[in-house]
Image (tube, coloured by chain):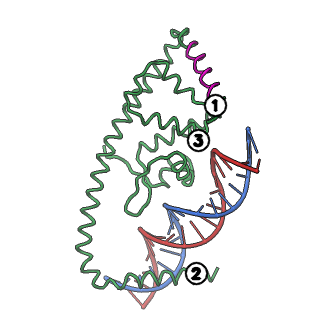
Chain colours: A green, B blue, C red
Amino acid sequence: MAENHYLISEASKKINAEAHVLRYWEEELGIEVPRNEMGHRYYTDEHIQMFKKIIELKAKGYQLKAIKDELTEDKMEPKEAEKTEVSVVEKAQVSPVVSSGDKMEQFHTIMTNIVSQALAANNEKLGHEVSGKVSERVIKEMNFIMRLRDEKEEERFKKLDETLRSYQKNHKARAEAAATVTPVVKLKKKKRRFLSRKKS
DNA sequence: CTTGCATAACCTAACTTCGG
DNA sequence: CCGAAGTTAGGTTATGCAAG
C-alpha cells in the first residue's frame, strides 16, 4: 500500500476545513509539515488522522493550547502509553478551557485526584471504558509504526528527488546555454502582471 | 516548438472578530 | 484591553490551452 500525499487543498477537503485553517493549526500547534520541491506543504494520512483528532477535540471545547499538549503527549514514545490506567485517565483530563494559571493547575490536580479515586472505586463499572482505552493504545502503537514507515518512505522520496535533480541538472546544462532566456521570461511575466493590475 | 494569456493554487503577513 | 482563533490581502508559481 503506497503512502498517500495530499496537497493542502486536498487535505482540507478531506477533513472539511479551510486550507488557511490547516496552515494556522500548523503554526499554532507546531505540526511539522514536509514540503515538496515547490515549497508546497504535503500531508500524509497520519496528518489527516491528526487533524481529525484536532477537530474532535475542538468540538469538545478544547483550546488550541490544550490540543497542542494532547498532541505532544501523543508524540511521546508508545511505551509511555503503558503507564497505569490512572495516568491514561489523567491524560483525558486536560482542561478544555483553561491552559495556564497556578490556581487552575491546583484545581486541575485536585480534580484529577478526585476522578482517579472515583475511578479506582468504580473500576468494575468502567470495564468497558478501559477496553476502549486499550484500543486507543493500540491505535497509538499503529500510529507509531505508520510514522516509522512514513519516515522511510520520505527518505525514499528524497533520494528520488536528488536523482531527478541531478538528471535535470545534466540536461539543463545544455538548455541553459540559452538560459539567458529565463530572466527574460520572468521580466515578461512581471510586465504582464503590471499591465493586468493597471487594467483593474 | 514557443509565446502569450488566463486561471488555479500556493505562500506569508497583516488584519479582524470575539469572548473573557 | 488582550489573547485566541480565524480571515483577508497581496504577491508568486504552476499549468493548461490557443495561436503563431
Residue A160's place in the image compared with A178, above or below, is above
Q: Earlier in the sequence, mark 2 or mark 3?
A: 3
Residue A110 at x, y = what percent?
Answer: 62, 20
Residue A105 at x, y = what percent?
Answer: 62, 29
Q: Amino acid at mark 3?
A: Leu
Residue A107's place in the image compared with A195, above or below, is above
Please, which chain is the residue tagged with disc 3 on?
A
In the rendered image, which quarter is residue A182 located in?
bottom left
Q: Which residues are magenta?
A: A105-117
Q: Which residue is mark 3?
A: A64
Would residue A27 appear left or right of A111 to someone viewing this image? Answer: left
Q: Does A113 lie within the magenta span?
A: yes
Q: Which residue is mark 2?
A: A196
Would residue A180 appear left or right of A115 to someone viewing this image? Answer: left
Residue A188's place in the image compared with B8, above or below, is below
For residue A102, which numbered disc appears in the image?
1
